[in-house]
Image: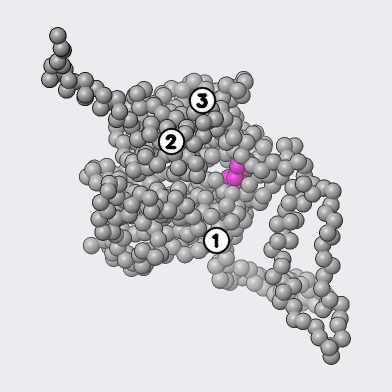
Amino acid sequence: ADIISTVEFNHTGELLATGDKGGRVVIFQQEIENKNQPQFRSEYNVYSTFQSHEPEFDYLKSLEIEEKINKIRWLPQKNAAQFLLSTNDKTIKLWKISERDKRPEGYNLKEEDGRYKDPNTITSLRVPVLKPMDLMVEASPRRVFANAHTYHINSVSVNSDNETYLSADDLRINLWHLEITDRSFNIVDIKPANMEELTEVITAAEFHPHQCNTFVYSSSKGTIRLCDMRASALCDKHSKLFEEPEDPSNRSFFSEIISSISDVKFSHNGRYMMTRDYLSVKIWDLNMENRPVETYQVHEYLRSKLCSLYENDCIFDKFECCWNGNDSVVMTGSYNNFFRMFDRGHRRDVTLEASRENSKPMQVLKPRKVCTGGKRKKDEISVDSLDFNKKILHTAWHPQDNIIAVATTNNLYIFQDKVN
Amino acid sequence: MSWKMLPSLHTALCQQEMEDKVISPEKVEEIKLKARYPNLGAKPGGSDFLRKRLQKGQKYFDSGDYNMAKAKMKNKQLPSAPAEKTEITGGHIPTPQDLPQRKTSIVASKLAG
């Protein structure tokens, strides 16, 4: 139940939320030392923990509904409280996280412990005073958006209008208003009339960061469709279709499986989007549909291991990807607790490891290398000794600073760039 | 008359053979897979995969079945508790709290899957 299933920074980066397989959400808050100096050191400490979703049973279909949190998305802050959307396979919930650091004292009709006083003993009137108390962080569910998805929800994305959001399952995408829980609009429906004809499913969806009418969704066939909600109520017809043509001579049994897109993310500036498929990360210019502008190989050495990766189901692992604050670097996870960063401008990439055995806190991470050929150099790891159970599927990058959160199966690692 | 292959033609033919033999690593893996699972469907990444994916979530016969399975899970977590109880010997008169709890029936309920 402690398996981390999602990681997300809020819009300022001060808060970091994680969701796990047991339906719990843990929020960390940044504490900065030496705020005034450029070389600040930040620490993330537990701020709030709550049970977001419970396991449920669908009586009609006799199916178990997992409480695992699939996605968490923060709302931009509007007032003193923080809001986030968390979802499992079927239900999305809006949670309000608020702080309480004062409490009223000196009631007229109540004792300090809450018992009611006998009104006949009261001889004078006083005004209760607010006194400081130890900080208490409370999480309360404000909205429950249920019963709108027949299939399993894989994505949630808040619109830039801060009033609506979308939720996507394998075959449909719904548009919700944050205030309204009893109805939602279906905006994409790719369910075929005859399920035997099913050839692809929706794997991820996201709203454009600035254009409130634009969203994209990716498919298991490696395509991305961009839709404009101004065009029609039902966005089954895409405005743009992003697909890299495949070389038919390279086609194999695995081609379609490894082309399935596991994550799609717009760049912060809204001009590009990044997709993650099994072996690579691709950057697309929204103005060019026929091929990506950049392609980065995450772990190409796995291409000659596809047979075993199919047998142990690893070929179906869904890796996420993320941009840094100024869209110059992208990051994604791999196996053996490795994660990869690609510096777009400098054409550099690095492989790092998130592990307690191989690095101490505050120690600079040493780049790792996987050896593919015959002769293994010292410090290199051979492909056959990679641990495929140690997968990094979820990573997040602070919206402004070079602070990253990397989730291994059971642990959360936070790394900060060393400022010289 | 004996025919001799011209050197250039010979080289060209050899190269062609080599190109045909160099298969992409993916194809090699596919051949391996098909050798292990000869009954693998002809339609890769097609409806079978997707259908399995859409059906994720353990299916139970009915809600009674589901609740029994959940109860079994909880019982599995209990064993450590009774072990902590100290043995009762000789000079101590047992009280109701000291007695072990009723063991679960050997005959399972008809609802259990």
- Residue B93 seen anywhere in this rendered image of the structure: yes
> The numbered mark 1 sits on a residue in which chain?
A
What amino acid type is highlighted by mark number 1?
Answer: Ser
Q: Which mark is residue A48?
A: 1
Furthest residue to the left? B7
Q: Which colour scheme is used?
A: one colour
Is mark 3 in CB contact (under 8 Å) with mark 2?
Answer: no
Query: Which is in the foreground here, disc 1 or disc 2?
Result: 2
Q: Residues in magenta?
A: A86-93
- Residue A59 appears left or right of B91: left
Is circle 1 on the same chain as circle 2?
A: no
> Which callout, 3 or 2, points at the residue further toward the start of the chain?
2
Q: What element carries label 2?
A: helix
Q: Which mark is residue B42?
A: 3
Is mark 3 in CB contact (under 8 Å) with mark 1?
Answer: no
Front in this rendered view, residue A290 or A318: A318
Q: Whole-percent x and y of residue A5?
A: 52, 50
How far separated are the C-alphas under marks 1 and 2?
A: 50 Å
Is circle 3 on the same chain as circle 1?
A: no
Q: Name the residue under label 2.
A: B32
> The numbered mark 3 sits on a residue in which chain?
B
Q: Residues within 10 Å of mark 3 (few under 14, many from 20)?
A: few
Front in this rendered view, residue A229 or A285: A285
Q: How many marks?
A: 3
Q: Is residue A88 magenta?
A: yes
Furthest residue to the top? B1
Q: Whole-percent x and y of residue A183?
A: 65, 34
Q: Which residue is drawn at 62% across and 36% down?
A: B55
Q: What element carries label 1?
A: strand
What amino acid type is highlighted by mark number 3?
Answer: Ala
**Above or below, comparing residue B86 to residue A323 in the picture:** below
